[in-house]
Amino acid sequence: MSKNPQRFTITAALPYTNGPIHIGHLAGVYVPADIYSRFLRMQGHDVAFVCGSDEHGVPITIKAKKEGVTPQDVVDKYNGIIKKSFEDFGVSFDNYSRTSGKTHHDTASAFFKKMYEDGKFIEETTKQLYDEKAQQFLADRFVTGTCPKCGNEEAYGDQCESCGTSLNATDLINPKSAITGAVPTLKNTKHWFLPLDQYEDWLKEWILKGHKADWKSNVYGQVKSWIDDGLRARAVTRDLEWGIPVPVEGGDGKVLYVWFDAPIGYISSTKEWAEREGKNWEPYWKDENTKLVHFIGKDNIVFHCIIFPVMLKAHGDFILPENVPANEFLNLEGKKLSTSKNWAVWLHEYLEDFPDQQDVLRYVLTANAPETKDNDFTWKDFQARNNNELVAIFGNFINRVIVLTNKYYNGVVPEPGEYSEVDEKTIAELKAYPSVIASSIERYRFREAQGELMNLARLGNKYLADEEPWKLIKTDEERTKTIMYVALQIASALSIISEPFLPFTSAKLKKMLNQSDENSDNTPDWDIIGTREALIPPGQQIGKAELLFSKIEDEQIQKQLDKLEATKTANAMEDQRAEPQKEIATFEDFTKMDLRVGTIIEADKMPKTKKLMVLKVDTGLDKRTVVSGIAEHFKAEEIIGKKVTVLVNLAPRKLRGVESEGMILMTENADGKLVFVNPDEDGVKSGTTIN
Ligand SMILES: [Zn+2]
């Protein structure tokens, strides 16, 4: 037990209830949060590990509309699936709540009301995007358009997923309604804004100065760039029906912005847990000695490092997060995981194909965790790590120890004799592992920590391979006893230290060694490994060997690869399906478009953007600047001199400060690569009209 038990509130990002969860969620948030929480409990700390389903917001209402059901139907369905996946994978939440529940509605409502009464919001009537056809205001995911920062043409009204910038819907260039496709108009509506700009100095002091050393560099860097860019007031209410009603005068027909209510869900979930356990929830959120840690993916950094802390600070009485160890993204076979494109390994499907092999997935996801950069999950790597590490090292060592102990001593731990030099060294190494692994976990380096766990199994495996008790038993029974005793100590240590990482394996192993939790008197804890002489004492009866891990065959992997290949084919067919014909245009409409043949004479990638390229085009009329989103598909040198089709009388618009005077016509091939619509016949001159 830890000498200084502390109170921890650990939160894991609330999963959004418009679909099941996949390996990316598990790797990015839930496995690391679970390792951390399980470790802290083993150290004797007081831990509240909370989560719940995030059930409000626009995407759920869009999905409900599409499926012809109510938003409540959508969230009920996925809340069930998600909750079961967490249970199946051993994620040890103390409470899993839902934001559509009463406790949460009351808590979030009261939170808003107090901030309102304390004058923490700015009340403003502003023009918001409105869809005349749907008779509805458009915000968040109801509207898409071009990101003013990076030029991504599919940015949402609250965030650009390409560059991570948080946006207001009115920031989008060429906004379009996601409901009807209509171009929105502007209409007056009243909302409440959180003046983030007023907290800039405080955020600089608290994060940029206060957490420079202890926050992960990917998190700190993102936060710094947002603060350096300058923060703006953000609306925390929406014109929407689905959500938590705005509980103040003038709030009719409006709800709290989903990103305002969701993080309060951590508090609601803690309340539910405390009530059930007969505890007081308040110290977990208000006592300065409590350590609050948020586990999230990198797309949530702005909300957990800027917006939620500002809310907590503005509300008063609450503690702030001590750390926000956000992970980067996990890719699948080299491509970005995508729920809508079904490019994912769904947890409930994984268990159908690999029953009882939860720990294998937990292991591989931690071994490959995107802790500091995006990382890739491949099925070949999954197979290799299972077969070469879990089976060949961990499983093999344990199997030998248990089988030989049963064979030689009827399963009774033998009395050791004098230690040899190798024994002394092996035991000393063993005793050093718990503190090494603890130190990695405390610094949120779960990958490194799990690597050390496997090194401990390697130590055992090598010890047995070098000492060869199966040969020695014929010539030196006394020495064999000592070897088996030492090996059993390593097995016992593995059963304990593996618990945060491989909880199912740990439980099986403890049972085999007769050190199960029910038998807690003889279950050594984490720190005792480093100090106590015998982890498993001579004379203790152990059980029979059970298989911990089994080999994964090529056919099983091929089946998964085939599944992904089928998804690829289905997506390609979907992409190739022609879009429906647009509304009829008159001949006059068409003749308004002045299309010309142009020649690209200069091309430069726009700095700090992924997609944009600044082109100088000879249109025959003049040489003008056109900004085009082609930088991911072409290098400057391959397009200079190219003949292109230019719409020359398109109203000029500014993209990242550069005025674009026209548009180059593009289409795309089956692989999604852009191609020019080009008049490449010899002798066609720049400036020639196209009609
Ligand atoms: Zn962007």
Image (spheres, rainbow, N blue to C red):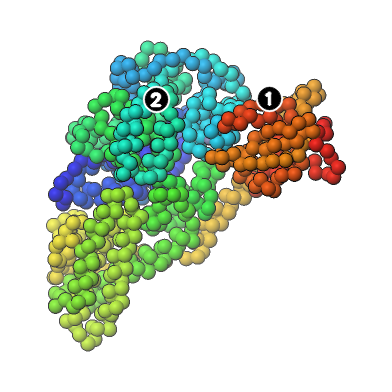
Q: Position of residue 226 (x, y in %)?
A: 43, 34
Q: Position of residue 302 (x, y in %)?
A: 41, 35
Q: Answer above or below: position of 62 versus 336.
A: above
Lower sequence index among marks 1 and 2: 2
Which of the 4 quarters of the picture holds residue 394? bottom left
The amino acid type found where label 2 is placed reads Asp
Q: Secondary structure at mark 1?
A: loop
Asked whether disc 1 touches disc 2, contact meaning CB atoms under 8 Å apart, the reply is no
Query: Is 304 left, or right, of 402 in this rendering?
Result: right
Can you say which quadrant of the picture contains the C terminus?
top right
Residue at 41% x, 20% y: name it: 193
Instruction: From the image, tell me which residue sits under label 1.
Output: 651
Between residue 669 and residue 546, name the one nearer to us: 669
Q: Position of residue 50 (x, y in %)?
A: 30, 39
Q: Answer above or below: position of 445 versus 473.
A: above
The single residue placed furthest to the right in the displayed view is 683
Residue at 13% x, 57% y: name it: 521
The amino acid type found where label 1 is placed reads Ala
Marking on residue 18:
none
Work out whether residue 53 can be spotted: no
Residue at 14% x, 63% y: name it: 532
Between residue 544 and residue 324, name the one nearer to us: 324
The response on whether ligand 1 sits within 8 Å of label 1 is: no
The response on whether ligand 1 sits within 8 Å of label 2 is: no
Q: Secondary structure at mark 2?
A: helix
Residue at 23% x, 67% y: name it: 429
Q: Position of residue 343 (x, y in %)?
A: 53, 47
Instruction: From the image, tell me which residue sits under label 2.
Output: 197
